[in-house]
Each structure stands twice: as structure tokens, then as C-alpha cells.
Amino acid sequence: MKYDYLVVGSGLYGAIFAHEAKAKGKSVLVVDKRPNIAGNVYTEKQEGINVHMYGAHIFHTNDKRVWNYITQFAEFNRFTNSPVANYKGELYSMPFNMYTFNKMWGVVTPEEATTKIEEQKKAVRSGYDMDILPTDIVTYEKDTLEFLDDLNTSNQKMINMTFLITCYGRTKRELESLMQRVSGIIQQANCDLRCLQYLQEQGLMASAPIGCNETGIERTLDNNYFNALYQGIPIGGYTKMVENLLDGIEVRLNTDYLEHKAELDALADKVVYTGPIDAYFGFKLGTLEYRSVRFENETLDIPNFQGNAAVNYTDRETPWTRIIEHKWFEFGKDEDGNDLPKTIISREYSSEWKAGDEPYYPVNDEKNGQLYAKYKELADKETGVIFGGRLGEYKYYDMDTTIASVLNMCEKELG
Ligand code: FAD
């Protein structure tokens, strides 16, 4: 039998295309080289917990069309991402908000926080110029010294956290320019710094580089990180959601398209390819780079490890950048509402990507952008093949933008 479409990759992009094509009466074969469906959103049930096997995935979107679409395939819970920063054993709320400021400076009202932030900005810019001190304190030498001491510590903490968070710049270029700008401030403040690998989480930039005085700081008691109109985790896991998308569609796992290209191509009129674009062309123009992250999973015989789904580690001493405790994505309960006795955590480490590693985050810098543009030219000439998704388009797509992109493509392709 000849299929209308061969879909390479059973991630969100491939699964949605396959679903939509089938709904239009087309015949579809999906292949994936992994032993499981769902691509990077794959979750696996262990100890009753849906473990996010390729990194924590929190669905968030302001796009109603996307939300209405995806909720046909799963019921979503009300999970709201409220990460916490652990800095030298102390917990701070993220994004920086009134909880953070209360902990650092003891301020209670947004007005007090604003005043303090303005003081801090001046201090940062001027290297603790005396003009930040209220004049009545200047007259009391001991108090002044203590005040300076205290300010220095608070400032160091703030700059450290700010810098570390700033280092999550979404692109290498963005990161480099931020680092340059922040390093001036750091020299003045004589701070102890650590440069993290970027983890490219959209929204982290909104956490407020205070020294750069550019982005907003929450002056509310709201720990909602993404602040999206729609947010949650599919009840029962992402894999179940993708299974629902692929219902009634033939899927062949452990099948590497590129290894069996001629034979698989012969099976269908058209190909939708969601693997890496450079691999499709045998890397003939060069290798696109990715950013990587390494996960170490551990099952613990206790019900609660950190009391929150995500804790970011921001000090130099800690080798991991984040710990995910998967059960808290679903409130520590199974689908019947029972508490789960064990817990599973993933420590995340920054890691250098080398060819052959799992391609996680495309690097949107000039060098890779130019190389991608050349591959795109080749792709445009490739008849009968549609390149899509994170790897096929070499684009930083969140789940919602992946869905928007494939739905737009379906409209064009399937009508
Ligand atoms: P993928 O899920 O990568 O699917 C591609 C599929 O193609 C894979 O299954 C792969 O095995 C298969 N494939 C590749 N080559 C071949 C081949 N030669 N033959 C056969 N099969 C092949 N988004 C959010 O909205 N919120 C988050 O919190 C979030 N967290 C993330 C955390 C991490 C660590 C990462 C990497 C991404 C995160 N994302 C998040 C983004 C999200 O994962 C993507 O938007 C989405 O998974 C993209 O789907 P895709 O189908 O394009 O790609």
C-alpha cells in the first residue's frame, strides 16, 4: 500500500500533522527512531509518577486557538510554574517579587520595595556611592558601617542571582552581550560570580536583571512564573496525550528514516520530516550546533524531597543547575487523588554538546543561523518533503509555538 504521507518523528509536530491528515481522509505512516512516541515531551510512568524523560515540560500559552486544540486530546490540570531559587541554602522566590524582596530586605509594601530597588540600582551603578545613604545614617559611623555591610551582602546576593538568571539568555548572542554589560557592574561590586550555561527557558529573562535596569520586576505576591493565560500539565502525562493524537494511525518505532530512506520514501507520496535538517542532507554543508543538558534521575524512598516541582540552584558550589521533582507537576497524587509514597527527582547539569549527542536547543547565533539558511535553501528545493518542528526548522519552539506552526502548515497542506 502507498501512503499519502510518511511522517518522520512522533513528537508534537509529527503527531499533530498525522492526526490532521488522517482526519482529512489521508493515509499516514509515522516512523520514529526512538523506542517510544512523543519526542521530547515523552513522559514515562515510574512509581505512579509521570516522569518527564527529556526535561520538565510545562505547557503555557496565550494562544486560545492552540489551547482549544490541544485540550481535545488531554485534560490539563491547574499546575502553575512557581520555581524557587536556592542560593547557598536559602530559598528565594522567582520571578523576583515581593516574597524575594521581603526575604532580602525585610520590606513589606510594593512602595518600600520600589524605594529599595532604586537604592540598589544606584548602588550598583556607582559602586556603593555614599549618595545612596540617607543623610541621617551618615552621621552615625557605626550604624553606617553596619548598613554598608548589610547593603553589600544584599547587593552581592542580588547581583549574583541576577547575573545567574541573566545568564539564561535565550540566544548565545544575547547571553554574550548581557555578560559584557553585567561584567562592568560585577567588577564594581567585586562579586563572586559563576557563569552558567544557558538553559534557554523562555520567560527567564523576565526575571529582572536589576543592574541592567531593563526588565520589569514583579511587585506583587505572585509566584506565577509564566503568567500565561492558559497553563497546566496533561493529566495522565504527555505520552497519553500524544497516544490520543496518534489513535488509529500506524506507527513504526525504532525505525531510523535516514538509515532506510529509499525504502521508506517508496512507501509514500510525500514526507513530513521533523528530524534535524542537517542530518537529512548528510551534514554536507557542516553540522548545526545545539545546546545540551544532562539529566540524572533518582528514585527516593521518601514522599517529599523539595516540596516544589522546580528548584534552581544559583550558587557556585552546587554542580547542578536545577532539580525537578516530577510528582509536584501533578500535586504529588495519582489520578485517583491518592498520595504517592515515593518520589523521583532529576538533577540537571549544563553540558557541552558534541555531534551525536541528543539535540536539545538550537543555537540561534549568527554562525548557525547562516548555516541553517543554506540548509533551508536545499530544503526548499527538495520536492515532496516538508521540514517542520524544532529540529526540521532549527527553531526554538515551545510546545505552544510548535502546535501553532504545525496547525498553520496543516491549513496550507491539507486545506
Ligand atoms: P521533537 O519532540 O524533538 O520530535 C522529533 C522526533 O523526531 C523525535 O521523536 C525523534 O526521535 C524523531 N526523529 C529524529 N530524527 C529521526 C530519524 N532520522 N528517523 C526517525 N525519527 C527521527 N516547551 C514548552 O512549551 N514548555 C516547556 O517547559 C518546555 N521544556 C523543554 C525542556 C527541554 C529540555 C527541551 C529540549 C524542550 C522543552 N520545550 C518546552 C520544547 C518542546 O519540547 C518542543 O517544543 C516540542 O517537543 C517540539 O516538538 P517536535 O515534534 O518539533 O520535536
Image (spheres, grey):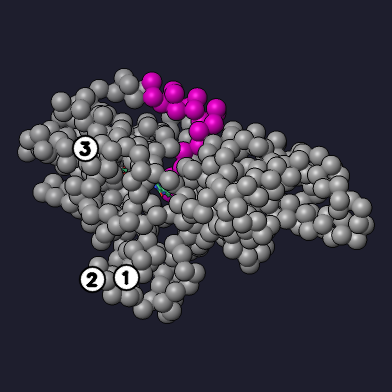
Identify the amino acid type marked 2. Answer: Asp
Give the label, 3 or 2, closer to the camera: 2
Tag 1's secondary structure?
Answer: loop
Identify the amino acid type marked 1. Answer: Lys
Image disc number at residue 333: 1
Instruction: Measuring from the top left, give residue 342's x and y in whole percent.
Output: 38, 76
* In this picture, residue 358 sits left or right of residue 152: left
Image disc number at residue 80: none
User: Which residue, given by chain and number where applicable, does mark 2 sit on?
Assistant: 336
Instruction: Measuring from the top left, give residue 321's x and y in whole percent.
Output: 56, 57
Q: Which mark sits nearer the N-terminus, 3 or 2?
A: 3
Residue 53 appearing in the image: yes
Q: CA distance from mark 3 to mark 2?
A: 32 Å
Give the magenta range.
348-377
Disc 1: CA contacts within 10 A as few (<14), some (14-19) or many (>=20): some
Instruction: Measuring from the top left, give residue 72's x and y in whole percent.
Output: 19, 47
User: Which residue, given by chain and number where applicable, does mark 3 sit on?
Assistant: 17
